[in-house]
Amino acid sequence: MKIRKLSLGIILVIIFIASCNNDDDSDNSMTCDFTTLISSEEYANASSDQLTINSLEITENCLKINFSSSGCSGDTWELKLIDSEDILESNPVQRNLRLSLKNEELCLAFITKELSFDISNLQVDGNQVQLNITNSDDEILYEY
C-alpha cells in the first residue's frame, strides 16, 4: 500500500512539473522598457539635449538603443522615442524617429545606457519598414 501511494505521489509530482514547463510562448516574449510615441507635435517639440547613439538592435518588437550623454548618474533623464507620423513611400517604406532626451544633470561624467522601445505600433502594410533615427543619422530595418 505504501508503494502504491509513493508511486501515485511521484506521478503527480511529475505531471505537475511537466505542466509548469509547458508555458505559453507569449509568456516568453520580450518586454520592452518603453513604448514608442507617434506624434508629429512631440517629434518637433520634445527635448533635444545632446546624446550620442552608439548602437541600434531589434529583438522581436523591441528596438534596443545604446546611447551616451553627460550627466551625474542618468537617473533623472527623461527619454522618449518619437515617430514623426510620416510614412515615406519607398522600398522599403521608411519612418523617421528621434530619441528625445531631457537632461538637467550638471556633471561631467559620460554615462552610457541601453533602453528598449516597443516598435510594434510602427508596422505598416508589408513585412518591413526602415526606421531612420534622425538625430543620429542611423537607420535600421525592422522586419516583422
Image: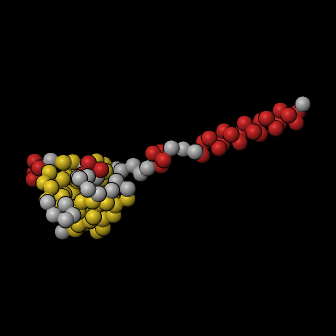
Q: Residue at x 47, y 45 (%)?
A: 27
Q: How is the image coloured?
A: secondary structure
Q: Nearer the viewer, residue 10 or 33?
A: 10
Residue 132 visible, this orientation: no
Locate the N terminus by quadrant: top right
The image quarter containing residue 113 is bottom left
- State left or right for residue 91 relative to residue 3: left
Rendered position, 12 above or below 42: above
Locate the C terminus by quadrant: bottom left
Q: Nearer the viewer, residue 48 or 42?
A: 42
- State left or right for residue 64 relative to residue 92: right
Q: Residue at x 19, y 65 (%)?
A: 91
Residue 142 visible, this orientation: yes
**Residue 10 on image: x %, y %:** 77, 39
- State left or right for residue 11 relative to residue 57: right
**Residue 114 on image: x %, y %:** 34, 60
